[in-house]
Image (cartoon, helix red, strand yellow):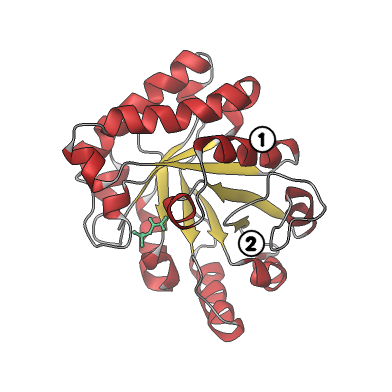
Amino acid sequence: MTKKMLIAGNWKMNGSLAANEALVKALVAGAAAPACEIAVCVPAPYLAQVQSLVAGSPIALGAQDVSTQAQGAFTGEQSAVMLREFGVRYAIVGHSERRQYHGETDEVVAAKTAAALANGITPIVCVGETLAQREAGATEEVVKRQLAAVIHVNGHCISEIVVAYEPVWAIGTGKTATPEQAQAVHAVLRAQLHHAASDHAAGIRILYGGSMNAANAAELLAQADIDGGLIGGASLKAADFLQIIAAAR
Ligand code: PEP
């Protein structure tokens, strides 16, 4: 299989012109010939800055969200067409913080996925259960429902997406899913993708996200169905992010 792992940083609402420059320069210097693919998903105001900082390097530019709409009266939104103008290759869609704080439904996430795909941007589709849902034994049902909505709208090009399993209770908490817990959910998602696109399911990358760091990355990435990571906090520290990149082979 030729599938390369993907290590994507989600800066969330962090950064400054000075901090971004130092971080990205260190990443470019430290990741000259990576075994995996690398992306940094940056706040929208910094897209132009980071586009020029990563130019000519193996680091791809990503956004953290994308509008369902192409243009018009949608104050505060950025369309996939606009993101393309800045060389954006990946867009996170359906991050749990957007589902939680911005009321994004499974249907909105599916429409955002479609908008990205229609414009040549690879959506990183996030799914994941809350602690209450896990404790109620609903993990499988929740992630399958979230992914099913995306497959329903984007079934014809589902092989173009990246999926990120991000248990909500593990995001920013320092509580990582065990490799076994993560692998179990990844296997469920793989089976669902197989059902939707049997020929392509093995090639679809399923990332793990949730307090992945330099110390735990290798063990998580060694799991059969974990094809990379979506990394929040640790992606803001060059040394840590580079160690995760080095573990992805
Ligand atoms: C995320 O925000 O996607 C994430 C995984 O965050 P963290 O690594 O900080 O838990």
* Residue sitting farthest toward the bottom: 18
**Ligand 1 is within 8 Å of the C-beta of the residue at disc 1:** no
Q: Quadrant of ligand 1?
A: bottom left
- Residue appearing at x 25%, y 39% in the figure: 133
Q: Distance between the residues labelled 1 and 2?
A: 28 Å
- Residue appearing at x 53%, y 14% in the figure: 199
Q: What residue type is labelled 1?
A: Ala
* Residue sitting farthest toward the right: 72
**Ligand 1 is within 8 Å of the C-beta of the residue at disc 2:** no
Residue 43 can be seen, yes or no: yes
Residue 61 image point, x, y percent: 63, 58
Q: What element carries label 2?
A: loop
Q: Is mark 1 on a helix, strand or loop?
A: helix
The part of the image, by quadrant, that contains residue 88 is: bottom right
- Residue appearing at x 56%, y 22% in the figure: 152
Quadrant including the C terminus: top left
Which of disc 2 and disc 1 is earlier in sequence? Answer: 2
Task: Give above or below for 13 relative to 105.
Answer: below
Residue 93 image point, x, y percent: 55, 46
Residue 35 can be seen, yes or no: no
Residue 116 image point, x, y percent: 68, 42
The numbered mark at residue 57 is 2
The numbered mark at residue 71 is none
Residue bearing mark 1: 114
Foreground pick, 112 / 15: 112
